[in-house]
Image: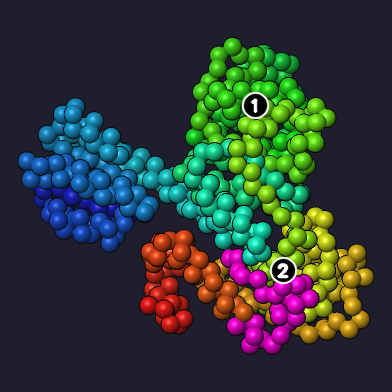
Amino acid sequence: MAKVLLIDDEVTMVQMVTELLRKEGHEVFPFSNFNAAMETLESQVPELVITDLYLDKTRAHGLDILAKARNLTPPATVIVITGFATIETAVEAMKKGAFDYLEKPFKVDDLRLCIQRALSYNNAISENFYLRKQLKTKYQFNQIIGNSPQMQQMFKMVERVADTDSTILILGESGTGKELVARALHFNSRRQFAPFIPINCSALPENLLESELFGHRKGAFTGAINDKKGLFQEADGGTIFLDEIGSMPPVLQSRLLRVLQEKEVRRVGDNVAVNVNVRVLAATNEPLEKKIKDGSFREDLYYRLNVIPITLPSLRERRDDIPLLVMHFLKSKADPRTGKPFLITRKAIEVLCAHDWPGNVRELENAIERASALCEGGTIRVLDLPPALHKLAKDDGSEEIVEIPAPTAETGTSPARPIASSPVQTAQAMSQSLGSLKDFMREQESSYVNRALAQAGGDKEKAAELLGVSVATLYRKLSEEGQP
């Protein structure tokens, strides 16, 4: 049942509605005093607010209640009731976010139905709010692992352009995380509550891709039995991500160019254009300049897409990030037989750092997935890694175990500074005693806390929100480091 805040200056009305709500099983906070209601509103964070509009017969205090209720996190649904209804007051209340407006005297059944509808609406909105919040957390910048100079440069670029409407071309080999960057760009922009629509341009034949992107009218072609919206219309207000853009057929390239230029789409078989407000992100794992030379990609479209290029380095170009990625992948797992975190040997770390990883981060993740499934005793050794990696092991490599700390809400999976200047040094640094690894983790946490503070401009409340911890936890960590 729901938590309901009720405000009306008529005591009999408060008693009647309170009794009705409690019979329905709701938790009710009844008030006939404006100031008391305003104080309780923020502390209780109700799902539903029922407020009289004129609490002293002269001033519309109910609009102040409405404004504060809509600014809660998540916002409360508000029903406005009044005995002094006019069209103007009703319009003003609805404009300020009221769910419904009831004029006194009203029937009890009408109020009951209105409450049921308001709570159903609130449940849907709250579910969407928390799902969006989880998605934003999942695709925060700190979920992209890496602290090499190339990755730090990429982070800075992504943070600078995320909240713009500029078209972005994401460049990088297969498996480097291009879609992860695209989602981070979307969920850290003002479009975060609108759709994010990804589509792989190489996965569909030309005729289906055209229909998917731009939609079609009924009867436009065989099998078009109904009108269909395209993905550009579905993404209206949000972001569309065109992966493997280099595989798009030339005919569709010209249509995409028109969308970028005119901000409108035309469905297959339709003569009417529809305006769309969509940010376009594109990605490719092949050099488009080469495709321009051989005539398979339009040069004018390339310049429209390449407004802001973001290049993701291959994993072999940032080997010092491999231990961080291994730690990240293993922290999200636990040995199903014991429930304990997985361990890994120094020799296995050295082998992972020595491999070139043509499949990049995706290949590394799959290798760790395989090793964690095959290892015995919860410890990953060289023989648990893919066979192609075994030849990279040195005979003098140690089988000393490196413990991967269990994940916590406070440490997260954020990027950290490099722990060594070469793969061998990195492996050796990670495989020292458990005490030194704790020091290493503490340094990582300190580095990331300082980065969050810098990003928040020194605002500790905002920094705590970015880190996903309470303000008290942030102050404690700063205190441990001797910071004010």
Rendering colour mode: rainbow
Per the rendering, the mark at residue 256 is: 1
232 vs 43, nearest the viewer: 232
Q: Does the stretch in magenta take in 395?
A: no
**Relative side of 408 to 479, left or right:** right
Residue 478 x/y as whole percent: 43, 77
Q: Residue at x 28, y 34 (%)?
A: 95
In the image: residue 259, left or right of residue 106: right
Query: Tag 2: residue type?
Result: Asp
Q: Give the distance between the C-alpha atoms of the residues marked 1 and 2, in whole angstroms.
A: 39 Å
Residue annotated with mark 2: 320
Mark 1 touching mark 2, by CB under 8 A? Answer: no
Residue depicted at 76% across the width and 49% down the height = 173
- Amino acid under label 1? Leu
Label 2 neighbour load within 10 Å: few <14, some 14-19, many 20+? many
Residue at the image position 27 percent from the left and 38 percent from the top: 96
- Is residue 426 on the magenta stretch? yes
What span is colored magenta in the figure?
Answer: 414-439
**Identity of the residue drawn at 71% across and 29% down:** 299
